[in-house]
Image (cartoon, rainbow, N blue to C red):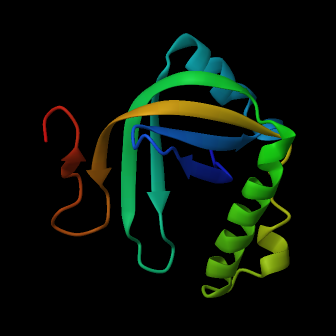
Amino acid sequence: MRATGLRFHDDDVHVTVYLPEVTSRNTVTDVAVNPRVAVLMSHPLTHRSFQLKGTMVSLGAAPDSEQPFVEAYLSTFAHVLEHVGMPYEVVTMISHWPSIALVMRVEAVYLQTPGPGAGAQLLGPNS
């Protein structure tokens, strides 16, 4: 599913992924059964991409104090997408609040940028 925010924690081990509540029902149900999570991040202008793999450690409604962060994240993303022809106003209309906060422990990081190094593990037990 499409997330609308990602925050790295100060411990460099955990991240919070913000999922729009209105579209996250299946994901919430799935991680309740199997807490293994994979998150793909990609920069639309450079295609630089990474995949995080790990385990969900908590899941619940994002507190209202996180709304400014999620809105700023989406706004920044919308400005990037303007460079490829997506109008800012269209991107910022994406459902994003209220959000579900999925906290995951990152156990491995993979390079997913297209090219000869795609799929290489950058961090994790086998790196």
Residue drawn at point x = 23 percent, y = 59 percent? 118
Against 40, residue 63 (above or below) is above
Left or right of residue 112: residue 12: right
Q: Position of residue 44 (x, y in %)?
A: 51, 73
Which quarter of the picture shows residue 113? bottom left
Which quarter of the picture shows residue 82? bottom right
Q: Nearer the viewer, residue 18 or 86?
A: 18
Which residue extends farthest front?
Answer: 10
Which quarter of the picture shows residue 71? bottom right
Q: Nearer the viewer, residue 1 or 9?
A: 9
Against 80, residue 66 (above or below) is above
Q: Position of residue 79 (x, y in %)?
A: 69, 80
Which of the image's four quarters has the N terminus? top right
Residue drawn at point x = 82 percent, y = 72 percent? 90
Residue drawn at point x = 68 percent, y = 35 percent? 101
Q: Nearer the viewer, residue 11 or 99?
A: 11
Q: Position of residue 121 (x, y in %)?
A: 20, 47
Residue drawn at point x = 17 percent, y = 62 percent? 117
Left or right of residue 26: residue 42: left
Which of the image's four quarters has the C terminus? top left
